[in-house]
Amino acid sequence: MTWCWLARTEERPEGALAAARIRFDGFLAVFPADAPAPPGERKLDARAIDPDGPAALVSLVLVPDDLTIPFDDPAVSGALRASLTAPWPDVLSTLVVGESRFGGALTAVRDGNRSRLDADPFARIFPARILELGPGLLGWTPPPTGPVVQRYGGGEPWPSDRFVESRSGNPSAAGH
Amino acid sequence: MRDDLQPGNRLPDLELRDHAGNERRLSELAGGDPVVLTFYRGWWCPKEQSFFRRLVGFQDEVEVAYTRMVSISVDPPEVQAAFRAGLGARWTFLSDAERRYVHELDLLETTDTLHRPYVPTAFTLFPDLAICGVWNGYWTWGRPSLEELRRDLREITRAIRRDWEVPSA
């Protein structure tokens, strides 16, 4: 699995791959790719998930449901470039809606240093909310090699960083 | 340079810290993509500064072409991070501050007894680290032009992408 559904829920959900409590604001949870799509239908890089992961500070950018923008919008590409230039956080995944829409981004740090989230480049596109997230959801996203800012196939988040042949039968479908 | 570091042979799968201090492996950094790998003397060398400014321009093409870039020197990670930030580079730098591979690869620049750096050397690699092209950049004109890199990356991409020719309807 290269991605999973991300959703905020009021209660700890049944059937989630992992979930963590947001301070004062319910839960952040992820669901398997073959589960029904939750509200918002946002896909997260599965490498970001670790059910045994520690607490984290999260900068969560969510594009309003009725206002998604193309993933290839220059504003998004610029944010991807900026994220490759800046010190890499502990977790970073863009959120994808459908095959090609930008639904936001999740950036997290685990050392409690909120200033590391101040320059979240995705917050230049839409406002970010800072969440204090409990343990049980986020792991570590390895920094991408760079400088690729393209996604590896339709529907995939960035930086999930290689083509997955089994899903499309074609290693570079929607690539090029 | 070691005799077997020639086109058709495979480069060793180096394990080094990146510019942020994370342990990385070259094959993991390659993923399934072609790689431009450059060994460089250090931030202090004006030839490197010139060459890397060209690579920084090149990354605007590479970023949409499913191709990775990796650079290796004996500088510590924090020095590499500063050099990378100063350049505006968006690819991974690997630190061999302990000089673990400089002798194994026979890439020590013997004429610089002060820094004991890598001989500037550039490789184009297939995803399995098989060497496509190699350039000895001890003299500036020995380094690859961007056109030479493009030619190799086209060759590698054509070889590894089954849909190089547009699939028929």
Image (cartoon, rainbow, N blue to C red):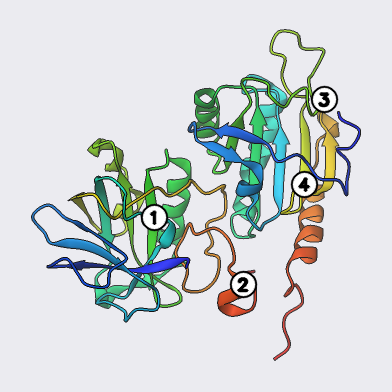
Residue type at numbered disc 4: Thr
Q: Chain of mark 4?
A: B
Q: What is the quadrant of the N terminus of chain B in the image?
A: top right
Q: Residue type at mark 1: give it.
A: Ala
Of the residues tagged 1 and 4, which is closer to the observer? 1
**Residue at x 39% of width, y 78% of height:** A34
Tag 3's secondary structure? Answer: loop
How far separated are the C-alphas under marks 3 and 4? 18 Å
Q: Quadrant of the C terminus of chain B?
A: bottom right
Residue occupied by mark 3: B106
Horizontal relation, residue B37 to residue B79: left or right: right
Q: Is residue B112 visible?
A: yes
Dot 1 and dot 4 residues touching (CB under 8 Å): no
Foreground pick, A76 / B153: B153
Q: Which residue is mark 1?
A: A48
Q: Residue furthest top?
A: B114
SS at circle 2: helix
In the image, are marks 2 and 1 on the same chain? yes
Looking at the picture, how far across and down is residue B150, in whole percent?
Answer: 77, 53
Q: Which residue is mark 4?
A: B124
Image quadrant in which you'd find residue A171: bottom right
Determine the chain carrying the residue at label 2.
Answer: A
Is residue B58 visible in the rendered image? The answer is: no
Pointers 3 and 4 in contact (CB under 8 A)? Answer: no
Residue A165 tag number: 2
